[in-house]
Amino acid sequence: MIKKKYIRRLMVSPGSKVSLKQYDTGWAQDDELKRVGKDAIKERAAEILEANRASLAESQELLWASNLYSILIVLQGMDTSGKDGTIKHVMAGVNPQGCRVTSFKVPTSEETDHNFLWRYTRALPARGEIGIFNRSYYEDVLVVKVHPELLDNQQLPPGKRGDKFWNARYDDINAFERHLVQNGTFIMKFFLHISREEQKKRLLDRLEDKEKYWKFALSDLAERQFWDDYQTAYEMMLSKTSTDTAPWYIIPADYKWIARSLIADIISTKIRSLDLKYPEVAEETLKQLEVAREKLASE
Ligand code: AMP
Ligand code: MG
C-alpha cells in the first residue's frame, strides 16, 4: 500500500489555507519518488490499484452485510481531470448492487425550486452502500461562484452575494456533512488536481480522436478561460470545507495512473479501518439453520 506520509501530505488539514501552486500535479512528488523513477512508479501504481480493487470489493461485501454505515465519495475537478475514468477504474470489481454513482449536471428547474442541497440529499447512499458523487454540492461554491449570474436561476431570497453569502454556503455544507457523519456516513472528498497544460492536451486529444468527439463540449473551452477564477474558488472551498471527519484530498492528476492508485488506496484503507464484521447469527437462528439444513439434505 502507499506510504502514510504521502497520503498525509495530500490531506488538507482543517483550517489551513490552501495554495494550489504548492501542490504538484505530476508524478515526481519529492526527491525519493524522483529517484525511484517514472516507469517504476507507474508499475507500482498499477499493482497498488489492482490490490486495492480486490480489497475494496471484499470490504464492500462487509459494508453491505453489516448494513450500518455508508460511504460517500465526492469527486471534483476541472473538465478533463479524470473523474469518470477514476470511477470506472477504481470501482471495477465492486458489486453494482451496493454502489450508486450520481453525476450532477446543470440543475433542472425542479431542482432550483428547492434549497441547493436538496438534489444531493436525494442521491445519498443508503446504509451498506457506497455512493459516488461525480461533481456534487461543491459545484454550488465552484461553477456558481465563478458565474454568480447562475444564482439568478436559484430562486433565492434577495440579498447581497458577497463573502457573507458564500461563507454561509460553506457553513451549510459543513453542517450537512457533520449531520451525515454523525449518522453513520463516512465521507471522502477528492480534488483531481491537473495543470492547465495537461487540460489543453486532453482537450486537444478529444478534438483529434473521432472516438473521443463525444466527450468534447464547447462549454469546456469557454470554462477554460476562467481557469484562474476556478483555481481561486477551489482554494477557498478546500480551505473552508476540509474537516477532520470529512477531509479533502488534493490528488495529483496529470497522470491518471497516479490519481487512480492514490484514490483506490485511500478509499480501501478507510473502509478496512472500520473493521467491519459479518453480522453475528444468534444461537436460536443457528439451530433453525441446522434444522433446515438437515431437512433439505434428507429430501
Ligand atoms: P460534465 O460533468 O462534463 O457532464 O458537465 C456537467 C456540467 O454541469 C458542468 O459544466 C458543471 O459545471 C455543471 N453543473 C454541475 N452542477 C452544477 C450546479 N449546481 N450549478 C450549475 N452548473 C452545474
Ligand atoms: Mg464534460
Image (cartoon, rainbow, N blue to C red):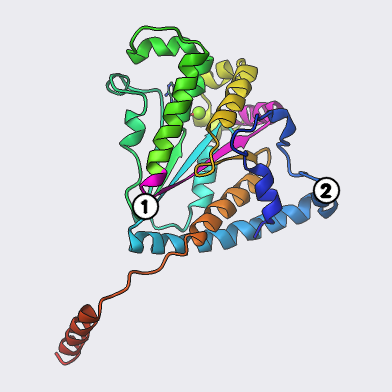
Task: Decide: is 273 above or below 135.
Answer: below
Number of marks in the image?
2
Query: In the rendered view of the protein, which quadrant contains the C terminus?
Result: bottom left
Is residue 201 a member of the stretch shown in magenta? yes
- The magenta segment is 181-207
Mark 1: secondary structure: loop
Give the x, y percent position of residue 177.
43, 38
Q: Residue at x 62, y 21 (%)?
A: 232
Q: Nearer the viewer, residue 132 or 38?
A: 132
Quarter of the image containing the N terminus?
bottom right
- Picture coordinates of residue 212, whole percent (x, y): 55, 33
In this picture, is 225 found above or below 52?
Answer: above
Q: CA distance from mark 2 to mark 1?
A: 38 Å
Q: Nearer the viewer, mark 2 or mark 1?
A: 1
Residue plotted at (17% across, 83% down): 292
Snapshot quadrant of residue 195? top right
Expressed as whole percent of the image width and height from the top left, the position of residue 253 reads: 65, 39
Q: Can I make out residue 87 in this image?
A: yes
Question: Which residue is the site of mark 1?
Answer: 129
- Determine the residue positioned at 45% across, 23% down: 169
Q: Is residue 226 left or right of residue 114?
A: right
Task: Indicate yes or no: mark 1 CB to ligand 1 under 8 Å.
Answer: no
Q: Amino acid at mark 1?
A: Glu
Which of these two is toward me, 203 or 246?
Answer: 246
Near-viewer residue (78 or 269): 269
Q: Is residue 158 left or right of residue 296?
A: right
Q: Is 158 on the left-hand or right-hand side of 57?
A: left
Disc 2 residue type (three-letter): Lys
Tell me which residue sits at (68%, 38%) in the image.
254
Which label was assigned to residue 34?
2
Residue 139 in the magenta stretch? The answer is no
